[in-house]
Image (spheres, rainbow, N blue to C red):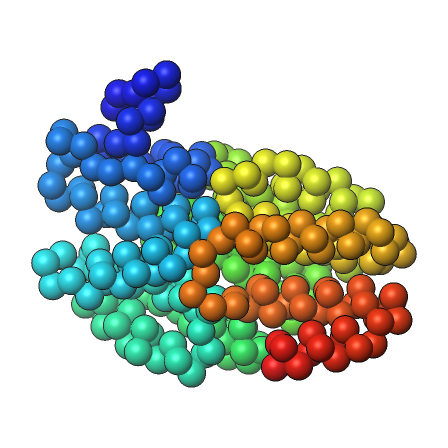
Amino acid sequence: MAGKGSHFGRAEVVSLAEAEALYRAGKAGLLSQIEPSRSTQPDEIPRLEIVKAMAEFDAGHVRASLERLESLALSEEHDTGTRFQANLALFLRASDFEAPGRMVSYLSHLRQSASRIGSPKSLGSLHLAVARLEGVRAAFRQSRHHMQLARRLIEISEDPVLMCTLDLVESSLECVSGNLVRSRSLATQCYGRARQLGFSKYILSSQSNLAVCFLYGGRSERARTLLTRVIDTTAELTYVRFGATDTLAQVELYEGSLSKAARALDACQNVLAQDCLPSRSWYDLAHQITRCAYHELAQDWETVLAIVDDAA
């Protein structure tokens, strides 16, 4: 790699390993701009494009990310492993913006790719993706069933990054379903794994999950400390920043500070305004509950009704 003033100044990358290192370091904004150089091995280019698409998503270029991943997933030119990785990345990200019923075609492609490979890693990833989708639609019994299958298979694969993903997703689902003790345990486990890997996104996301557990357990000051740390270090990860800022607004509402909550809600809108989204996400819809809570405390019932109507 070469550059003007920095190692990556020319926005090009030589190898897949270098791109993956940038991704783990949380350099989503920079990575979303890179292009393969003349020295890049041809067989690495499709996988490099997947990493770039994932970085685009984290940096808020969601529409471009999904379009790139769909193109990679459907291309007959790529090998089965590459198409599976693209299908998995696409399914996990598109499901944030689509109703569960509309994910059937995505799931069909993912299932076919996973079955062709037939490894514990591919099949475990498939069950993990389904568990996450079932959790989104509040089907927690089905979600836990798929999560158990995913954990058995992924533990066989011994893939450290996938283990991080597993812990983070399960931590989020357990929190939503009300099992805060297990949610906190899994978030702590994810944080430890992520620190060993130097994987910035998982470090920050696990801290955000821990903050939610602290807040729901009445430890709002501990939650604020974690969230402030996350928000201060997510300039290039707008997706993580949005969730952390929404939780910070909940902390301020818990402590009865409407003025601070209003500032956090404004910050959420600023983050959303930066992103190029195909539609409103499930996280955005969850954020509307926080907004309703704010206007309820302010006794602004007309705004609460307007938010609910708009969300519906």
Location of residue 233 in the rendering, given as x and y in whole percent from the top left corner = 59, 36
Q: Is residue 109 visible?
A: yes
At 67% from the left and 37% from the top, the residue drawn is: 229
At 33% from the left and 24% from the top, the residue drawn is: 9
Location of residue 239 in the rendering, given as x and y in whole percent from the top left corner = 52, 52
Looking at the rendering, which quadrant does residue 156 occupy? Answer: bottom left
Looking at the rendering, which quadrant does residue 1 occupy? Answer: top left
Extreme residue in the top direction: 5
Does residue 160 appear left or right of residue 72 in this picture?
right
Q: Nearer the viewer, residue 152 or 39?
A: 39
Asked if 302 appears above or below 46 in the picture, the reply is: below
At 37% from the left and 66% from the top, the residue drawn is: 91
Does residue 3 appear left or right of residue 132 in this picture?
left
At 59% from the left and 59% from the top, the residue drawn is: 171
Asked if 23 appears above or below 141 in the picture, the reply is: above
Asked if 304 appears above or below 59 in the picture, the reply is: below
Location of residue 269 in the rendering, given as x and y in whole percent from the top left corner = 63, 55
Asked if 6 appears above or below 195 in the picture, the reply is: above
Does residue 233 appear left or right of residue 127 in this picture?
right
